[in-house]
Image (tube, rainbow, N blue to C red):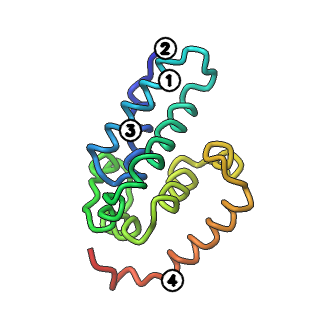
Amino acid sequence: MSFNRQDLDSFYRYALSLTRKEEWAYDLVSHGVEKVLSRPFVLNKKAYAKRCIRNKFFDEYQRKEEAVAFIDEEVSLDDLEKTAINKDLIQKVLKVLNPEERELLYLWAMEDYSLSEIASLTKTPRGTLSSRLARLKKKLKSTNWEETHE
């Protein structure tokens, strides 16, 4: 079993949405791929890799004090240059969101997952995700992006 470049890029974007740090994102992708390759019996390898990436992040990185430093760090969005998204706005959005909100926004808006699919991936009740998404939308709408400092 091997992953193609598109799969690895998808894993990296997902990990970067969680960590906002390139080196940590690469570590998470490496961990996720390693887990999949060590378990040949896994049926949905892509979903399993993303679950491993997510679990590793929340098990290790969020518990550490470095998770607080994410808020002040610059985000590297070079891999997203192909899209017509305003990088400055994306950086501002990411700075006001916590890791759970960034993950939900990424899976819902960027990967186009349904709330049911996100619930299955994150082991979170669909109703909880629906409430979080509503609060997230309200938070994003109420933020004055012109006054948000980088």
Disc sitting over residue 36 in the figure = 1
Residue 146 in the image: x percent, y percent? 34, 83
Q: Which residue is mark 3?
A: 28
Q: Which residue is mark 4?
A: 142
Q: Counting residues from the N terminus, which is met first, the one under dot 2 or under dot 4? A: 2
User: Type of residue at label 3?
Assistant: Leu
Spatial separation of the CA atoms under disc 4 and disc 3? 33 Å
Q: Counting residues from the N terminus, which is met first, the one under dot 3 or under dot 1? A: 3
Q: Nearer the viewer, mark 4 or mark 3?
A: 3
User: Type of residue at label 2?
Assistant: Met
Q: Nearer the viewer, mark 1 or mark 2?
A: 1
Asked if labels 2 and 1 touch by Cβ distance under 8 angstroms, the answer is yes
- In the rendered structure, the answer to whether residue 131 lies left or right of residue 32 reads right
User: Type of residue at label 1?
Assistant: Val
Spatial separation of the CA atoms under disc 4 and disc 1? 41 Å
Choose top left, top right, bottom left or bottom right for residue 85.
bottom left
Asked if labels 3 and 4 touch by Cβ distance under 8 angstroms, the answer is no
Q: Counting residues from the N terminus, which is met first, the one under dot 1 or under dot 2? A: 2
User: Type of residue at label 4?
Assistant: Ser
Asked if labels 4 and 2 touch by Cβ distance under 8 angstroms, the answer is no
**Dot 1 lies on which element?**
helix
Residue 99 in the image: x percent, y percent? 46, 59
Spatial separation of the CA atoms under disc 3 and disc 1? 12 Å
Q: Which residue is mark 2?
A: 1
42 above or below 71?
A: above
Locate the C terminus and report the quarter of the image it occupies.
bottom left
Front-most of 54 and 148?
54
Spatial separation of the CA atoms under disc 1 and disc 2? 9 Å
Residue 138 in the image: x percent, y percent? 58, 77
